[in-house]
Image (cartoon, rainbow, N blue to C red):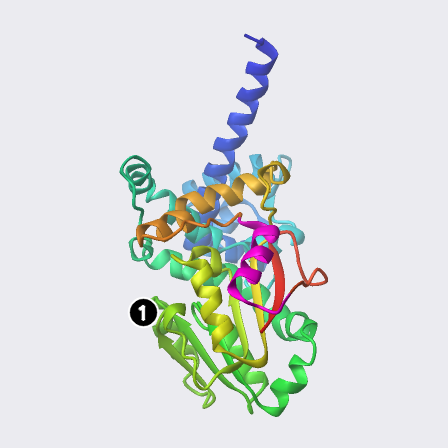
Amino acid sequence: MDRARIEAFLDRFIDFAAGATTIGLLAVADRSGLSRHLGEVGGGTIEDLAEGAGLQSRYVQEILSGLAAAGVVDYDPGTRRFDLPAEHALFTSDESSPYFMGGFFDVLPAFLGQIDGVANATIHGGGVVFEQFGEAVVRGISRSHSPSQRTFLLSRWLPAIPDAVPRLQSGIRVADVGCGSGTVAILIASAFPKSRVIGYDVSSRSIATARDGSMTLPNVDFEERGVEDLPLDPPFDLITTFDVIHDLTDPLGGMRRIKDALAEGGQYLMMEPNASSRLEDNLSPRGAMLYGTSTLHCLTQSLAGGGTGLGAAWGRQRAEEMAAEAGFGSFQPLVEISNKFSSFYLLTR
């Protein structure tokens, strides 16, 4: 046995555990309002922060101590102040920031809460259905995607599609499949009142939230249905999916349905996790996170429905292959708007 390798892996294992517990502390800070208060005031002593946020000082002390040890907040022993750097607040406190990661504080605890179910499926087959993850996952998915969607959809993502903006301005039919809480559909309907936008999702919770947020818009509707039931007539001029295809029970069938639902010359914007289809290209902390969340949610809820279990790390190479199998005429990676987390592809009929 290599003693140095044992010691090195012990340090790595401590990093694993520290990451998990830090997410737990951030989740408590998020749900209790401590993160929001820190973002507003910037910092203070335990007493000041506990009083200002209306929280119990002993909990605030322990939470902030852990976050200081993790490097989330700064601690000054001389003044006994805890300060949240403005750059860190973009991730933990500012829900308008495209870097906001608050959705992880909802979805990761929900995913971990289904470990027994995933372990049972690993032994016996099947999986954990989406509904078992509860309200926290619906809320967390919205909080994960909505900040970047509000920041970039109209300013960067849609303008990256050739002629999409002028066509939307003149009036076309748009579908957002797997619409979640409806952010994308509502943004498009608000910005382009001559276009008709319909959001589809299999989650009744998501559709209810979307309808509540769109009551004043006459040109947007939401329907509870899956991609396999996507209407074909009249066809759509633009279809979008954001982190949807890899979750489907039949992703290839879903892509074929989307292709069939497009009008001639129609465009399909697909956002999926930024990954390679080759494991050797994904051997990194980001890859570990992707495979982990895939196992604990994406993969298992697909297999629960008797699906293929494509998984979140299916990657660009497989996406291009499946686009051809589904019958799309072209597949174009939109590298100018891709980022560390997400890849964007433009497919045309």
Which residue is found at the position 44% from the left and 88% from the top?
216
State the image coordinates of residue 139 (x, y, percent, origin top left): 41, 61
Looking at the rendered structure, the number of numbered marks drawn on it comes to 1
Q: Quadrant of residue 229?
A: bottom left
Q: Main secondary structure of the magenta part?
A: helix
Q: Residue 112: x, y in percent?
A: 38, 42
**Residue bounds of the magenta highlight:** 314-330
Which image quarter holds the C terminus? bottom right
Where residue 108 sits: x, y (%)? 43, 47
Identify which residue, 90 or 259, lies in the foreground.
Answer: 259
Residue shown at the point (33%, 56%) measured from the top left = 130
Horizontally, residue 175 falls left or right of residue 286, namely left
Q: Quadrant of residue 181?
A: bottom left
Q: Locate residue 48, reporting x and y percent.
A: 52, 50
Answer whether residue 12 is magenta in the image. Answer: no
Q: Is residue 78 above or below residue 329?
A: above
| Label 1 crowd bin: few (<14), some (14–19), many (20+), radius 10 Å | some
The answer to whether 182 appears left or right of 40 in the picture is: left
Residue 80 visible to an observer of this rendering: no
Residue 334 found in image quarter: bottom right
Whether residue 116 is visible to the viewer of this picture, yes or no, is: yes
SS at mark 1?
A: helix
The residue tagged 1 is: 204
Q: Quadrant of the N terminus?
A: top right
- Kind of residue at badge 1: Ser
